[in-house]
Image (cartoon, grey):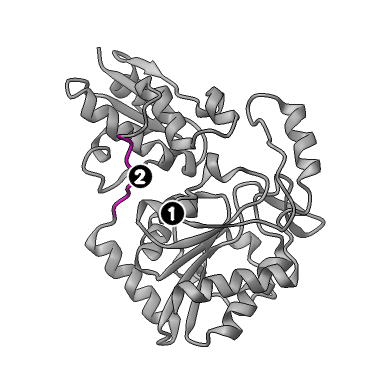
Amino acid sequence: MNTTFIISGGAGRVIAAVPALEKYARLNPNDDFKVLVYGWESLFWSHPVLQSRTFSIHQKGTFEVSIKNNRVVCPEPYYVHDYYNQKISLAQAFDAEINKTSDYSDLTPPKLYISTLERNSALRIVRETSKERAKTLVIQPYGSGMGILNNRPFDSSHRSLDVDAYLKIVKRLSEKNRDLSIIYFGDQNYRHPADDVSVDLKPYGPDLRAYLSLIAVSDYFLGCDSVGQHMARALNKNGMVLMGSTDETNVSYPDYFTIYRKKGHVPTYSPIRLSGLDCEFADRLNDGIMNFNDEEIEEICDTVNASLY
């Protein structure tokens, strides 16, 4: 019997599942397995192993085509003991669930692919928006927890950058590097009117594939714990991740990216999907963890600068 893997959650989780799914394909060549995701199937376009196997769970006919005659597996990395004790990464926890192993030595980094057309389209956008600047940086300041509170963007999970800190960072980067083009990766609803530094991609209407391609042709990625960092890692793009309430061992790539945290603030672990009230209390203790002061912002910008030049 063939298998159908249902990968729930956001786009970052989907990308983190890629290495375990590739490994499953290597170890089980006779299983014509399928992958169902909640609207992120385009991330697997151009992937030589996963493109033809991946479908949206919301597509008409999914049950007949991908589920009915298969065994269904719903891996949940957040339930893995070593994961919620900050011993393994999200990708390793998916490996534990999908391949039933605790040996991650053969687990490769996630890998995503873009087409030649997508690369050239991204280069065109960079040329049209960069005003012939020498370097391009993609910044994703806000994650999926971002919302609006009192007419101001706010992330109660404290994974996204504080808005004031974000504005100071892009302004300082621009002041330090006059030849740096900064591309804003994020929801237009949260783009602050005071941000007159970063490139506004609204006229181009970018989706996840467009952002993926822009990261691929950029020089550096700067972001928070959200999908952009997973894209950057899957494209082997250098970058820095500004960490707040989550643990880099779990959700990022500390052996690859530069990880930066607020001085003296160790995050309180939030047991997502395991214990709701404990998550609320953790959020309270993590309050302010992504509101960097001027000294920290200077360190962030100096580190980016050293990597770019």
Name the residue carrying label 2: 109
At mark 1, the secondary structure is loop
Q: What's the magenta region? A: 106-113
- The answer to whether residue 199 is seen in the rendering is no
Name which residue lies at 47% across and 62% down. 239
Which of the image's four quarters has the N terminus? Answer: top left
Residues at badges 1 and 2 in contact (C-beta under 8 Å)? yes
Name which residue lies at 60% across and 85% down. 175
**Location of residue 205 in the rendering, given as x and y in whole percent from the top left corner:** 46, 63
Please state which amino acid type lies under the numbered disc 1: Tyr
**Location of residue 197 in the rendering, given as x and y in whole percent from the top left corner:** 59, 79
For the residue pair 302 and 162, the one nearer the viewer reads as 302
Q: Which mark is residue 256?
A: 1
Name which residue lies at 43% across and 40% down. 16
Camera-side mark, 1 or 2: 1
**Real-space Cα separation, disc 1 to disc 2, in angstroms:** 10 Å
**Location of residue 161 in the rendering, given as x and y in whole percent from the top left corner:** 66, 59
For the residue pair 213 and 25, the one nearer the viewer reads as 25
| Above/below status of 66 relative to 46 | above
Whether residue 186 appears in magenta in the rendering, the answer is: no
| Above/below status of 13 relative to 265 | above
